[in-house]
Image (tube, rainbow, N blue to C red):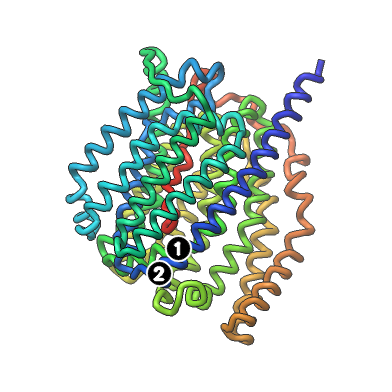
Amino acid sequence: MESAPAEGEASLGTKVRSATRWSLVNTMVMRLGNFATGIFLVRYVLDPAAWGVYGVAQTVLMVLLAANELGVTLAVVRWDGDVRRFAPTVLTLGALSSGLLYLVLFVSAPAVATLLGSGEATAVLRVMCLCLVLDGLSQVPAGVLTREFRQGRRMAIDALNFVVSTSVTLILALRGWGAMSFACGAVAGNVVALAGCAVAAPGMLRFGWDKEQARALLRFGLPLAGASLLSLAVVNADAMIVGAVLGNIALGFYMLAFNMAGWPVRVISETARRVSFAGFSRLADDPKALSAGFARALGVLMAATVPACVLLGALAGPLVELVYGATWRPAAEALPWLMALGLARIAAELTYDCLVAIGRRRSLLLIQGLWLVTLVPVLILAARAGGIDTVAVGHVVVAGVIVLPAFLVALRRGGIAARALARVCVRPVLGGAVMGVVLVLLRQRLGEGVVALCATGVIGLVCYGLCVLPGRTLVRGALARRGPTRGDERPVADAERAVAPVPAQKQPAAPARER
């Protein structure tokens, strides 16, 4: 009688592991490619001002992408039943909303660019935000690939996207197109990605309309669209404020620091999020398994991310100069704080996926709203009081003092105890502290040469490993010692969770700013 569930769990575990491996390879290859392209452009082609213009356009695009499909397309991942039955309605909604958003942006682009302190970004905005329409069309087939854990096909699509977008960007940048080269490259890459999605998930680009399905999708999708929009606003509020208050050059330095901070965060977080929501959704009906799975996932993510964040934060100045050149050294002022923010973002994003999977839409909306309402005035005051470093400090303070505690409360109400999460995080945090002290001391003693930095980094990583490796069993068994959870109380009805989507993992394909 129990063989069927066991086989189902084994099958799900196999799919998740396979998808995770493909997702990791995909993310690392794409990020390394973006990294190499960004270094070339920053060192030899673009100046901080041009980087800042591109940053304004990319920031606006990322915020609009959050609301692009009204929060309904990733219902394809979560909704039970035959996906072909409701996909046409989802595609129609996505196409209509993305087309309307683009028209509004096209008309308001001059005002938006001026408001963000970069009037010359108008044309770049209008071109780059064509990705809105392409994204609205591709979300259904992309959602099907995620639903079925077909990350191998996603890797092939992303590779084509990267090759095309990077080639177009480099060619145009070398011809003096500046920030516009990124916009054209992003559009070209997204066209190829749309074609790839259509081939990889045949039959998913069919328009249709079912009034009842549309009503259900909008009823449950709009709150998630709001939470998604708030989330992207939180992530990009700093860039908007830096550009408006401190100008394009400061924004260029801040963007570079934010991108560097995103290296470990995005590689690890994107790898996990491409499978985490689908995995949590499968476990949503088993609170005990969901609690154990979330704790294990958080422990693995923290253990993998902390050393990279500490390394980049402790050696920020010499690493920025080594990679991008002395001209960009001011970016190092914000980098250590942004690395701390990166750790908080990884925990917040994983929590977001888990809460969506169990239907806690209202909690997400409230927390994201609280984050944004608190963050904006803090960042404005920070920007006026200092520079990009004070902006980064303000970000960390808000995340650590207000947002993460709020997420912990929401998780506890969903049946996941903070004590179990603390167990799997304590050794990575302790190891990171030890590693940071070692790196600072060795940097003072050995200097900032290439050989010295390599030796310093290796010794720091060894110290971290000695602190963390004895705790590997904690990640696997943190919840084994726990008693029954409160998860037997269902937070919402099954029907209410049936179409709960999450923010799509938007990848506009431009190789520079990776917010």
Image quadrant holding the N terminus, namely top right
Tell how many labels: 2
Question: How many neighbours does mark 2 have within 10 angstroms: few (below 14), some (14-19), or many (20 or more)?
Answer: many
Q: Is residue 336 above or below residue 287?
A: below
Task: Identify residue for label 2.
Answer: 389
Can residue 491 be seen?
yes
Residue 360 visible to the viewer: no
Which mark is drawn over residue 38? 1
- The answer to which of 230 and 399 lies nearer the viewer is 230
**Residue under the image location 50 percent in, 61 percent down:** 35
Q: Amino acid at mark 1?
A: Gly
| Residue 40 location (% of width, % of height) | 45, 67
Label whose residue precedes the other's in the sequence (1 or 2)? 1
Q: Nearer the viewer, residue 51 or 222?
A: 51
Q: Is residue 472 above or below residue 42?
A: above
**Amino acid type for the residue under numbered disc 2:** Asp
* 151, above or below 315, in the image: above
Quarter of the image holding residue 174?
A: bottom left
Q: Which element is circle 2 on?
A: helix
Q: Give the spatial CA distance, label 1 vs label 2.
A: 22 Å
Q: Nearer the viewer, mark 1 or mark 2?
A: 1
Estimate the x, y position of residue 386 in percent, counting from the top left.
33, 71
In x, y percent, where is residue 444?
A: 59, 85
